[in-house]
């Protein structure tokens, strides 16, 4: 049975943490660079899970003597590979993308707060007003729409007199009709 050590266990464990931690960090950076920019974009639920798993694995690698550098790098390659496969499938299947990341939700449109959508998404009016203030808008008359994105951020779309294709997709407008 291992002895419980509280204050000092010698230099060997500290040296192991320094060496394995540094090499694992370099390995993570290399894996993330190889996997591409998408891995580091704003997070949806799946990205959040991968991030938590990577952080947990990194912490375990640093503190568990039984975990080798090779095992730790395989762990990170597995997590990034899973993230790559999921994002690859997302770009090829709308149904899969909606399953994994969901779809944006229209919360405000043309002067009207969409109460049902706000309650379902647990977003308060004050949060949307704050998002409009962040865009330096003085009042809601300047706002065309507010959308809760799949990353959890609020997009505020200013009213525009310009013609052309709107960034508000038809499926968002259907949400207005349902509200």
Image (cartoon, grey):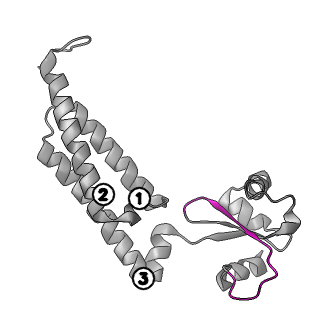
Secondary structure at badge 1 equals helix
**Mark 2 or 3 closer to N-term?**
2
- Element under disc 3: loop
Q: Pointer 1: what residue?
A: 40
Q: Position of residue 16 (x, y in %)?
A: 15, 29
Q: Write down the quadrant of residue 41 in the picture.
A: bottom left
Q: How far apart are marks 2 and 3 (CA)?
A: 24 Å
15 relative position to 167: left or right = left
Q: Are marks 2 and 1 in contact (CB under 8 Å)?
A: yes
Q: Give the range drawn in magenta.
A: 151-166
Q: Which of marks 2 and 3 is in front?
A: 2
Residue drawn at (79%, 51%) of the image: 126
In this rendering, the answer to whether 1 lies above or below 166 is above
Task: Indicate which disc residue 32 carries.
Answer: 2
* Residue annotated with mark 3: 93
Indicate yes or no whether the magenta region holds residue 162: yes
- For the residue pair 99 and 16, the one nearer the viewer reads as 16
Q: Which of 51 and 161 is in front in this view?
A: 161
């Amino acid at each position: 049975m291992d002895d419980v050590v509280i204050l000092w266990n010698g230099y060997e464990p500290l040296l192991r943490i320094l060496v394995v931690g540094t090499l694992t960090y370099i390995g993570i950076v290399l894996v993330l660079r190889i996997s591409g920019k998408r891995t580091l974009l704003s997070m949806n639920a799946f990205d959040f899970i991968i991030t938590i798993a990577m952080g947990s694995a990194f912490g375990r690698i640093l503190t568990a003597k039984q975990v080798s550098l090779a095992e730790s790098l395989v762990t990170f390659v597995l997590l990034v590979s899973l993230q790559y496969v999921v994002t690859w499938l997302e770009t090829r299947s709308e149904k899969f993308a909606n399953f994994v990341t969901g779809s944006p939700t229209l919360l405000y449109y043309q002067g009207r707060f969409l109460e049902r959508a706000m309650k379902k998404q647990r977003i308060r009016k004050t949060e949307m007003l704050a998002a409009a203030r962040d865009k330096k808008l003085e009042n809601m008359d300047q706002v065309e729409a507010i959308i809760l994105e799949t990353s959890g951020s609020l997009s505020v779309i200013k009213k525009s007199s310009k013609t052309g294709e709107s960034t508000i997709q038809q499926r968002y407008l259907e949400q207005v009709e349902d509200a």
